[in-house]
């Protein structure tokens, strides 16, 4: 991954698929004194997601390739801001946490800041037990391999754009978040994990936590990505 000449500022990338019930409120809640480029990346919605995101003030990008990671990568490549933050578009992530995520990067103290839902305040039912277990297992494994202790694979995160470019991200599905954490740890980046608030999604149906099939698919993709990446980066 390579990018254009970087400008000062922060971009927020929000990958979405059929989030018409939630995306407008998510975009409107973004603190624009911190975030000056909101990029909603649509992976093929069949509802009113695109129209509502646009009306709320986001820049909408269409990503024909299927996958969560493909949408995140497309959004990052579409901005020239110095810092890129990521969050989900279902209302479960709290936009009020964004200043705490990007602040240490803008201040030159960190390269990568990730939220931890397990260390923060969670609404009842906002995370499935398989998500909590997977986060701790992945954190333990990455600590054993790279000496960095994570407690979650939270989508709410921020990273220097030049640092992201150097990682060489390639995962196109749900392994994207895990890959970023593994590559950042392997590269010796300055990493900070902070507790963040996590809520139940504000509407619509979850692609991961809401069904056994979705959870199993995501778990398989994440598990296979870990093994594949750990072997490639050995």
Image (cartoon, rainbow, N blue to C red):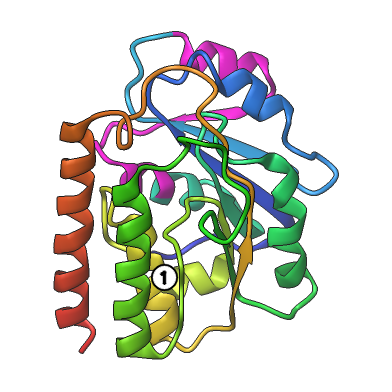
Query: What range of the chain is rendered magenta?
Result: 48-72
Residue 108 left/right relative to 26: right
| Residue 74 can be seen in this image | yes
Measured from the top left, where is residue 210 in percent x and y?
Answer: 31, 29
Residue in the picture at 59% in, 53% down: 85
153 is higher (above) or lower (below) than 209: below
For the N terminus, the quadrant is bottom left
Location of residue 233 with respect to 165 vertically, above or below: below
Asked where in the image residue 228 lies, by quadrant, the reply is bottom left
Q: Nearer the viewer, residue 113 or 167?
A: 113
User: Of helix, strand and loop, which one carries label 1?
Assistant: helix
Q: Residue 108 lies in what quarter of the image? A: bottom right
Residue for point 47% across, 37% down? 126
- How many numbered marks, from 0 up? 1
In the rendered image, residue 24 lying in the magenta stretch gets the answer no
Q: Residue 190, how many percent across, how many down? A: 59, 83
Residue corresponding to mark 1: 181
Question: Along the horizontal axis of the image, is 57 left or right of 92?
Answer: right
Dot 1 surroundings within 10 Å: few (below 14), some, or many (20 or more)?
many
Task: Determine whether, in the image, residue 52 is placed left or right of residue 141.
Answer: right
Q: Nearer the viewer, residue 28 or 193?
A: 193
Q: Nearer the viewer, residue 160 or 229?
A: 229
Give percent across and percent down for residue 204.
42, 17
Magenta-drawn stretch contains 71: yes
- Asked where in the image residue 168 lies, by quadrant, the reply is bottom left
Give how far across and how far down residue 234 sits, in percent: 20, 89
Say if 178 sits above or below 59 in the image: below
Residue furthest right in the image:
33
**Residue under the point 48% across and 68% down:** 164
| Res 168 seen here | no
């Amino acid at each position: 991954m390579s990018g254009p000449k970087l400008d000062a500022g922060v971009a927020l990338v929000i990958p979405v698929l059929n989030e018409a019930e939630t995306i407008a409120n998510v975009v409107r809640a973004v603190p624009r004194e911190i975030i000056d480029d909101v990029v909603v990346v649509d992976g093929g919605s069949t509802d009113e997601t695109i129209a509502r995101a646009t009306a709320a003030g986001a820049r909408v990008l269409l990503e024909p390739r299927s996958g969560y990671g493909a949408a995140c990568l497309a959004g990052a490549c579409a901005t020239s801001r110095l810092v890129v933050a990521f969050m989900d578009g279902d209302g479960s992530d709290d936009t009020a946490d964004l200043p705490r995520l990007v602040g240490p990067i803008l201040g030159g103290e960190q390269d990568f800041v990730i939220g931890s839902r397990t260390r923060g305040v969670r609404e009842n039912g906002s995370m499935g037990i398989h998500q909590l277990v997977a986060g701790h297992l992945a954190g333990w494994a990455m600590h054993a391999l790279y000496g960095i202790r994570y407690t979650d694979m939270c989508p709410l995160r921020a990273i220097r754009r030049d640092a992201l470019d150097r990682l060489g991200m390639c995962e196109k599905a749900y392994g994207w978040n895990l890959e970023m954490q593994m590559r950042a740890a392997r590269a010796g980046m300055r990493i900070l994990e902070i507790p963040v608030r996590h809520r139940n999604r504000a509407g619509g149906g979850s692609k991961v936590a809401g069904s056994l099939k979705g959870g199993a698919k995501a778990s398989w993709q994440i598990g296979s990505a870990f093994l594949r990446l750990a072997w490639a980066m050995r």
